[in-house]
Image (spheres, rainbow, N blue to C red):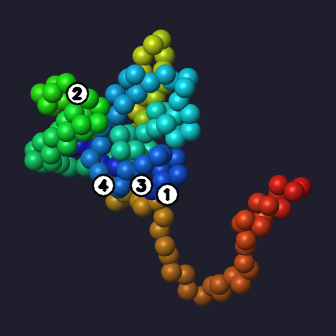
Amino acid sequence: MRLLRTIRLDPSDTFVFERAADPGEWAVSGAFMFADADPDALAGKSRAAFRGGFLGWSTLVQIVEATQEDRHALVDTLAKQLRERLGAPDFGAARAAAEEEVAFAASLCDHPRDTLIAVRRTFEGGAIREAFRTLHPRGTRKPMRAFSFLEVEGEEESSEEIHLVALAKEKRSD
């Protein structure tokens, strides 16, 4: 079976969302978090989470292999959160909602393992609409990391120092 795990290719999620998911957390869409929200009132980090975040919050998730135990743990954790933080009327209702969310997340996993998925959420006609985009690794190579560090021999290291803050201040005074 396959499920979704959060992935962080760069530190941007830590700036974009109120609380960014740690890499490797199990993930679900999370659109239900905005069921009672006024889309016009969302601003800043809440708006960013609405527009493009998987619950936790993460901009991207990765399709990974999972066990039945992983799935059960995800459902239990999500049900507990639905009960404690979102006021589900009882654990049975919370568990049913969690099962539905996890089943939906699993339905997004009909692509090859390691495929990355992004979400785009909008509010149209009184309903939340989600569109999912997949990013596949090219060819048969292993998935690339966001950054690779190469050791380069025979090149001299630059002695030039760049002060970004000073440049930004200088740009504003122009």
- Foreground label between 4 and 2: 2
**Pointer 3 or 2: first along the chain:** 3
Q: At numbered mark 3, what does the secondary structure look like: helix, strand or loop?
A: loop
Q: Which residue is mark 4?
A: 24
Q: Amino acid at mark 4?
A: Gly
Residue 97: x, y in percent? 21, 27
Residue beneath the point at 83% across and 62% down: 170
**Pointer 4 or 2: first along the chain:** 4
Name the quadrant of the N terminus: top left
The answer to whether the residues at label 3 and label 1 have Cβ atoms under 8 Å apart is: yes
Q: At numbered mark 1, what does the secondary structure look like: helix, strand or loop?
A: loop
Q: Amino acid at mark 3?
A: Arg
Q: Is residue 55 visible?
A: yes
The answer to whether the residues at label 4 and label 1 have Cβ atoms under 8 Å apart is: no
The Cα atoms of the two marked residues, 4 and 2, are separated by 26 Å
Q: Amino acid at mark 1?
A: Pro
| Neighbourhood count class around disc 3 (C-alpha, 10 Å): few under 14, some 14–19, many 20 upward | many
The Cα atoms of the two marked residues, 3 and 1, are separated by 7 Å
Q: Residue 26, relative to residue 128: is it above or below?
A: below
The Cα atoms of the two marked residues, 3 and 2, are separated by 30 Å
Residue beneath the point at 48% across and 64% down: 147
Q: Which residue is mark 3?
A: 8
Q: At numbered mark 2, what does the secondary structure look like: helix, strand or loop?
A: loop
**Pointer 3 or 4: first along the chain:** 3
Q: Amino acid at mark 2?
A: Ala
> Going by the image, does 46 lie left or right of 134?
right
| Neighbourhood count class around disc 4 (C-alpha, 10 Å): few under 14, some 14–19, many 20 upward | some
Q: Which residue is mark 1?
A: 11
